Amino acid sequence: MSGAPGRAAPGLFITLEGGDGSGKTTQAELLEQWLTERGRVVVRTREPGGTAAGVEIREIVLHHRGDIAPRAEALLYAADRAHHVATVVRPALARGEVVLQDRYIDSSVAYQGAGRVLDPDEIRNLSLWAAEGLLPDVTILLDLDESAARARLDASRTRYDRLEAERSDFHARVRAAYLALAEAEPERILVVDAARPVDEIAGEIRSRLEGRV
Ligand code: TYD
């Protein structure tokens, strides 16, 4: 691995973020197609659940019946991340590939930090420790208001997972935290209005990435 532990070089590390129902999966598919057409090797992955151990952690954190204490939840996401970064993300970046990842550290800051009302700085530091400082090169934030996101989820789900089932004030805090993160790091985080048609959103994402792939 070249460079300092926090550096993503020589590959490109792209993360997709946003609330539940913001359309990340659709955009990830389109972006993967575009990157592949441009000759890049793409590793499409996600958190939680981007490794075999992570699939088991995902099952606990999303589907455990009964309470999980907020700090335990934060540690489960961090454990998933530590293993995923060490065994999937860093090796792919070291091979010069594009890692296209559904959710990363910003999810923890938004959901556990703001949603669960833990300290966002502590959550960020926990995540950075887990990931040995690895930050994305580019983050696409699909921004959608709570009621539109809920309507999309209702149309596509027969049951909600633990996080999706949280009340609307939880999801409002998550959205506000994401927007605050984007304001603090405008170079890294591109905010995209996810209420628009799929093709328009995909076009905006591509034009932002044009110079980097
Ligand atoms: P996701 O895979 O996007 O859900 P789905 O496959 O149902 O679209 O994310 C799973 C949930 O985990 C989502 O509600 C956000 C939450 N999450 C956190 O709370 N913290 C985290 O660090 C991550 C990565 C996800």
Image: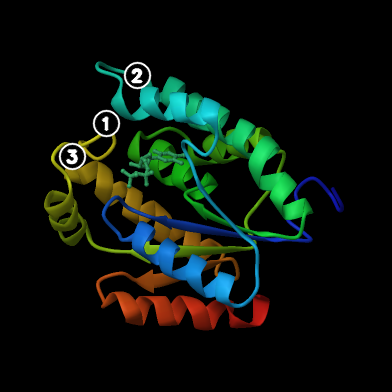
Q: Nearer the viewer, residue 77 or 157?
A: 157
Question: On the rendering, which quadrant does ligand 1 occupy?
Answer: top left
Cα distance in 3D space between marks 2 and 1: 10 Å
| Mark 3: amino acid | Arg
The disc, 2 or 1, on the residue closer to the chain's N-terminal end is 2
Is the shortest distance between ligand 1 and the CB of mark 2 under 8 Å?
Answer: no
Of callouts 3 and 1, the N-terminal one = 1
- Name the residue beneath numbered marker 3: 167
Nearer the camera: disc 2 or disc 1: 1
Estimate the x, y position of residue 66 in percent, counting from the top left: 25, 16
- Name the image quarter holding residue 185: bottom right
SS at mark 1?
A: loop
Q: Identify the residue at image location x=70%, y=50%.
A: 92
The reply to whether callout 3 and callout 1 are in contact (CB within 8 Å) is no
Give residue 162's position: percent from left, percent from top.
Answer: 27, 31
User: Amino acid under label 1?
Assistant: Arg
Residues 114 and 104: in front is 104
9 sits to left or right of 209: right
Q: Nearer the viewer, mark 3 or mark 1?
A: 1
The residue to which callout 1 is attached is 162
Counting labels gives 3
Q: What's the residue type where badge 2 is placed?
A: Ile
Residue drawn at the location 40% of the way across and 76% of the way down: 202
Q: Residue at x 55, y 69 (%)?
A: 186
> Residue 125: horizontal and vertical position, in percent?
62, 37
For label 3, the SS is loop
Tell me the residue at 29%/50% (across/down): 20
Residue 170 seen in the current view: yes
Residue at which label 2 appears:
68
Tell me which colouring the rendered structure shows. rainbow
